[in-house]
Amino acid sequence: MKERILGYIKEYGYITTWDAFRDLGCTRLSEYIRQLREEYNIVGEKENAINRYGDKTFYYKYRIVEEENDIKRTI
């Protein structure tokens, strides 16, 4: 699964929890991101959204960063 997540990020530029569940059937994205961070410079960018009930919420878009000055918001 780790390789599929890495391939997804490389193909689409980022991955979210919903992307991982919908497209890869992965329900443990954060664990695979933790593992991938041992080999790659992966950051999570916080995205704000509104849920179906009109409440403010957020999610993270994980992507690979090539250069240090490319880092915006990280977790």
Image (tube, rainbow, N blue to C red):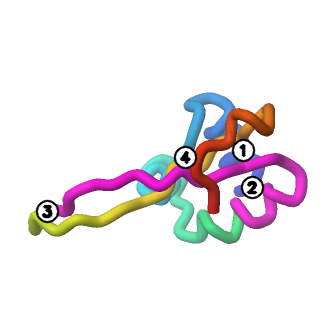
Relative to 46, is 7 above or below? Answer: above
Residue under numbered circle 3: 52
**Residue shown at the point (67%, 51%) measured from the top left:** 43
Proximity of marks 1 and 2: CB atoms separated by less than 8 Å: yes
**Which residue is pictured at 16% across the width and 68% down the height?**
55
Question: Does residue 49 appear left or right of residue 33 in this picture?
Answer: left
Lateral position of residue 52 relative to residue 73, left or right: left
Q: In whole angstroms, how far apart are the C-alphas of marks 4 and 1?
A: 9 Å
Give the CA separation, mark 1 to mark 2: 6 Å
Q: Which residue is mark 4?
A: 15
Residue stretch rendered in magenta on the structure? 33-52
Find numbered disc 3 in the image and state the secondary structure of the residue it sits on. loop
Q: Amino acid at mark 3?
A: Arg
Name the image quarter holding the N terminus. bottom right
Give 30 or 41, whichever is nearer the viewer. Answer: 41
Amino acid type, label 1: Leu
Q: Which residue is mark 2?
A: 2
**Residue underneath mark 1:** 6
